Image (cartoon, rainbow, N blue to C red):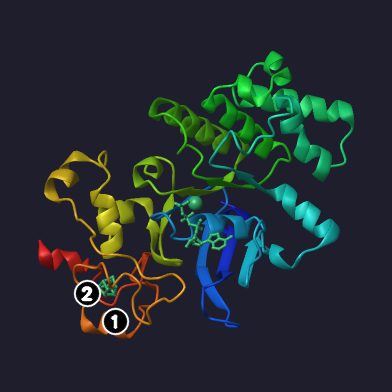
Amino acid sequence: MSETENKPLLDVENLTVRFEVSRGGSWGKRSYLYAVDDVSFTVKRGETLAVVGESGSGKTTTALAVARLVPAYEGAVKVGGTDILGLEGEALRKARQRVQFIFQDPYSSLNPRQRAEAIVREPLDSLSTKSEAEKQEIVDRLFAAVGLRKEQQRLFPHQFSGGQRQRIGIARALATQPELIICDEPVSALDVAVQAQILNLLRRLQAEFGLTYLFISHDLGVVQHMCDSIAVMYMGKVVEHADRLSLFNNPLHPYTAALLSAVPSVDRARREATRRILIPGDPPDPVNMPKGCRFASRCPVAEARCRESAPDLRDVGGGHRVACHLVDERAVSPLAALT
Ligand SMILES: Nc1ncnc2c1ncn2[C@@H]1O[C@H](COP(=O)(O)OP(=O)(O)OP(=O)(O)O)[C@@H](O)[C@H]1O
Ligand code: SF4
Ligand SMILES: [Mg+2]
């Protein structure tokens, strides 16, 4: 394996995104919601990192910030070693060709008044300097690559099924020959049977074009066949990050264990050995986070120290990172004591 293959393609360092929010009554006082709070992770070239977590955990905001579709407040997003957050002009245009986005809703993300061929060609028109004939050839190849017929190029988005619309979104994302594709819940809006087809297509394209994926999903079941490693987010923080097998076989953070116990299709032996862990209680106010562990209000094993200080995300061996005071160097889940 060459040196470039070993290096991460994407290196996100201390990424923080905050939104100013108005809270009634506090005249002149600014409040901020830290949707992404000091998040770091890497994705190796040709691999898939899944980012999972409940609604509101900051997955989409992380994805948008990596693609520079929302501004980061702090941190770095390095693609192939270059921090793209500081780029402008021609350098930014080049960087935009390397990173593309597939959106959750294949209908609202496609312009209803544009024909499919124009939608797929659009990134080439704005980001590349190719001739008309070259662009048409690329569009033809992309339609074939995602399993659409040439005559469908003339149709409008409403003339396609949901799965076909997502194929158009994927073709559009591939147009500039990107290295990194960010998929934000790419199959959540689709029927289960169609979900499998689109996931298979994404995997095939990854192998064919050597793509690297940042794959966002609220559903661990969807990502289990789709990723090399997984980062679990809770309230703007990564609480656990490990390779897929370590995370599925030895979830260490109580929140990860609860998420996993709710996945119906994870292997049967595990399902029979573990009961479903419910996470009652409310998450904290995102504008007024507690000083201690953000999961403490819902954690079945929380202790006094959990409310006093926030646990750091630390490596407990083999690159398995977890942010929990009760996980020690033996890398045993604190929930093991309960069962
Ligand atoms: N433009 C914005 N202005 C203010 N707050 C925002 C904005 N975008 C997101 N947020 C807030 O940031 C937090 C994270 O939102 P985000 O959409 O990233 O979560 P998510 O994990 O993608 O959730 P979902 O699973 O529902 O898509 C939420 O509290 C959300 O309300
Ligand atoms: S630090 Fe404490 S509250 Fe947070 S997950 Fe671990 S045990 Fe639960
Ligand atoms: Mg989202």
Residue 57 in the image: x percent, y percent? 43, 60
Q: Which mark is residue 195?
A: none
Q: Secondary structure at mark 2?
A: loop
In-front residue for pair 246/99: 99
Residue at image location 49% in from the left, 44% down from the top: 185
Give the alpha-carbon distance from disc 1 to disc 2, as whole Å: 8 Å
Residue at image location 54% in from the left, 74% down from the top: 32
Dot 1: within a 10 Å radius of its alpha carbon, few (fewer than 14), some, or many (20 or more) residues? Answer: some
In-front residue for pair 213/36: 36
8 lies above or below 170: below
246 lies above or below 320: above
Q: Which mark is residue 307?
A: 1
- Residue under numbered circle 2: 302
Residue at image location 61% in from the left, 72% down from the top: 75
Left or right of 115 in this view: 297:
left
Residue 63 in the image: x percent, y percent? 56, 55
Mark 2 close to ligand 2, CB under 8 Å: yes
Mark 1 close to ligand 2, CB under 8 Å: yes
Tag 1–tag 2 contact (CB < 8 Å) = yes
